[in-house]
Image (cartoon, helix red, strand yellow):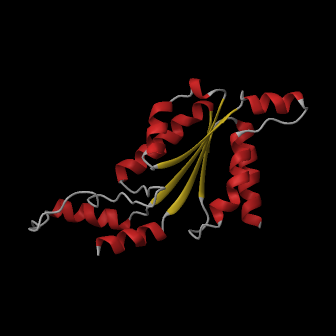
Amino acid sequence: QENQQQQQHQQFAQDIVLVATGSGIAGVMSVIEHAQKLDTIVSHDNNISISGSNSNTSPVVPQPTVEQQQQQQQQEQQVPVRLHVYYGCRRQDDMPFRNELQELHAQGKIRLTVVESCSTLNRKRKTEGKDKFYAQHVVERDLEALTRNGHGEPVFVACGNYQMLDEMRRIVGKSKAS
């Protein structure tokens, strides 16, 4: 029954696309921390982390307290989430929360995509007279894959400079129109 519940949560997981530039990563970290506290993150390797699902159960199950019953009811009402983090920064070496984000990515709790504005690719694009490639452009590139996974429309959260926010409005608006 627990395995069936895990598959059901995986099937109905809500994709949340978190896009940040610069210090906007602080807001994204707040969303990630909240999802971790609620214990609703669906792993990208198809393992789910629901409170109690990873613990060993004993053959004798004690009667839950009223507080535990209320907590269980809250968990059953929570929607499992799959987190996609797109972060635009100058260089990965200067990235705030770098170790935490890489660890969460390694654990499968988030899918992390870092786009460096000072990368060799962007310097080459600039010398060729082309626009730089930023985090929002990678989101736009990945949008079809994010929306065709059968879990409904993703929820978008963007934190950062106004140019990125304007472009994200355009990108999300375009995806809803099609």
Q: Is residue 48 above or below residue 26?
A: below
Q: Residue at x 77, y 52 (%)?
A: 170
The residue most toward the top is 94
Query: Closest to the observer: 6 or 73?
Result: 6
Judge from the rendering whether residue 47 lies leftward or rightward of residue 72; answer left or right.
right
Picture coordinates of residue 38 (x, y %)? 36, 53
Where on the picture, by quarter, is residue 71?
Answer: bottom left
Q: Residue at x 79, y 27 (%)?
A: 123
Tell me where residue 154 appears, x and y as whole percent.
60, 60
Quarter of the image for the C terminus: give it.
bottom right
Q: Residue placed at 57% from the left, 24% from the top?
A: 93
Left or right side of 154 for 170: right
Q: Total label count?
A: 0
Q: Residue at x 29, y 76 (%)?
A: 1
- Asked if 43 appears above or below 178 in the picture, the reply is above
Q: Nearer the viewer, residue 174 or 122?
A: 122
Q: In the figure, is residue 61 to the left or right of 118?
A: left
Q: Position of residue 108 (x, y in %)?
A: 45, 50
